[in-house]
Image (spheres, helix red, strand yellow):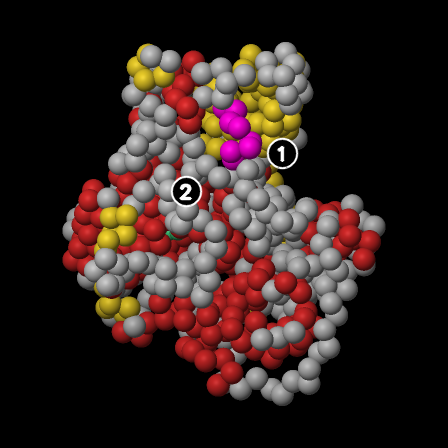
Amino acid sequence: EDIQAPRGGGSVLFKLESDEAPPSVATRVGVSPSVNLPVPERKDVTLQDLGTATSVPKGSAFSFFIASHRKAARDLCDFFMKTSGAEDLMQVAARVHGKVNETLFVYAISFVILRKKELRSVRLPTMVEVFPSRFVPQEALSKAQLQINRMDPNQTEPVIIEHGPEFSGTHLKPEHRISYWREDYGINVHHWHWHLIYPPAMGFDRDRKGELFYYMHQQVIARYDIERLCLGLPKVEKLDNWRIPIEDGYFPKMTVSISGRNWGSRQDNTLPKDLRRRELGEFVDITDMEIWRSRLLDAIHQGFMIDRNGDKVPLRDDVTSGKRGIDILSEALEADAELSVNFPYYGDLHNRGHDILAFSHDPDNAHKEEMGVVGDLGTSLRDPVFFRLHKLVDDLFQEYKVTQPPYTEEELFLPGVRIERAGVVRGNEADVLLTGWNTREFEASRGLDFSGKPVILRLTHLDNKPFDYHIQINNDLREPKEVTVRIYLAPKFGDREKEMDFMEQRILWAEMDKFTVLLKPGKNQEHVTRSSKESSITNLEELTFKDLENSGPGNTSEQDAFNFCGCGWPQHMLLPRGRPEGMVFQLFFMLTDYAQDKVSNPGGVRRCANGVSFCGMQDAKYPDARPMGFPFDRRPAPLLQGLPVNTTADYARLGNAFMHDITIKFLGEKLN
Ligand code: CUO
């Protein structure tokens, strides 16, 4: 029987909410209503208008790690940026649609919507509905199509595609035990959006862009290692030897876009090779990778980089003006060809690392195979090798961080305020948190055409039961005090089932939340409660096409829709899985002086103000003046209150810090 391949990308991939959001709505969220711009007369779009945008073939993968693809994206974004208003953009986009690569098209549209001021009220639907083929195997989509072909034409019941953690691997390979985490839709969507708002070489910089590249990826690695500990898997090993085979292969079983090409697969024990992809203009030698790493290490240990004029650029994090060392190092490592102090010299270690790995199964195009998923921003976390590459990247950042002077007692201590007690509560149970499975449904038939029939994707994912932090704080000062509350989580025992010393645990602390509290003056006991759903790292739930259609004026989800910008860690992945018998974790709480942490940002309530710790805020400075990851981004202070520091618990000797053990239990069943 003939299986008709579903077509990619319906005519409207996203709902362009009008520029003319009702004033009441706009006022409520504190943003001035945008001007309604006249729509100019448009001639048809010519090939010249699109620059190199048509150089990426349709149906093939688009990779932001490849320089020629970045150029194509820049050309298309520049073209879309010239439009005036939503209506004009929609008209122009409709003309470009079908002329350029599908992923590139969605990338450029999303980029422009997030950057153009007059498009502030435009919302993007979740990538899961725009590109369902990146979240479920092609086999499942074809089966659904087959079912539709056989269906009674009058049937209105949707076809359901189930996809979950047990569907793609076997227990023969230990790495499959954690595939539910790597292949989680929310984590991959977050990663796509993060890079969309912090792209390299797109002609602009953002406040602390380099530092956030380090921090967000460091936190992903930490969370992945924590999850591995829950499952009894060893921590990820960095990929620092490119001349031996990569043990773990990866078989995506998915298509790039529905029109056909399969993502490349990597066999177990594939040896990375020099990249010779003439059709992409990509040539990288393994030797280049080794030289770049060695030059970056030289810079780290000498304490400076060399710019293109041969001048020294110091690398220090304790600067009071200009860029921090971590920012400078990161722009040279990622690399951003425009912001790197010396792109020809320090090279392009991280981007080219993605490229070499993405093409390791066919480095010279001899087999005309497509790249692997590690080459694409929206799929790269699926492949175990992503974490080995990013562990290498993080290892360089950590090598730099330990060269920085430890925080002094003065920087760590906040006199006058004291945490008396702190912990978590769920229902009426204290200090035991629960995880389990859950499902979320998306419409596959929005991004793919199933002969006009409804098709639902039912994705199984890890989830957790919501809980509250309870913190009892004493303010001994005569005046009110505004403090930043910082909360981190790490396993109590390391991979040797022993308590960890400060340095081992330092890079495992996962940020859980960060917020400010105003403490009343005068020997005051303040009981602070905070819901896990308010976390500074997480996003709101993904918006579906249906949510966008329903988010009319007066609808309560309007505010949420307005705040949803795609970036942010998924709420359902806030907690690590834990273990069925319960696993002991530690919570670390620290109060710092908000007067010192504060960053002045004009304006009131902001759009895209979710997941700020990982994503920053749109059109605003990163809202915390301290180095990201404070206080765990540096070596421990040698002495605190005259006593040596060996473990994190020694930090909790300070009155403004507190540590508390909790248990995370994995129920292994569906949470309700
Ligand atoms: Cu996010 Cu390598 O930077 O994937």
**Residue 369 sits in quarter:** bottom left
Which residue lies under the disc numbered 1?
Answer: 533
The answer to whether 633 appears left or right of 24 in the picture is left
* Residue 554 visible in this rendered orientation of the protein: yes
Magenta-highlighted residues: 590-597
Pinpoint residue 548: horizontal percent, then vertical percent. Answer: 71, 56
Q: Nearer the viewer, residue 161 or 49?
A: 49
Residue 80 in the magenta stretch? The answer is no
Location of the C terminus (image quadrant): top right
The answer to whether 305 appears left or right of 51 in the picture is left
Q: Nearer the viewer, residue 484 or 119?
A: 484
| Total count of labels | 2
Local secondary structure at mark 2: loop
Q: Residue at x 35, y 41 (%)?
A: 317
Which residue lies under the disc numbered 2?
Answer: 320
Label 2 packing within 10 angstroms: few (<14), some (14-19), many (20+): few
In the image, which disc is placed on residue 207?
none
Between the C-alphas of marks 2 and 1, the distance is: 34 Å
**Residue 124 sits in quarter:** bottom right
Q: Residue at x 63, y 63 (%)?
A: 117
Q: Amino acid at mark 2?
A: Thr
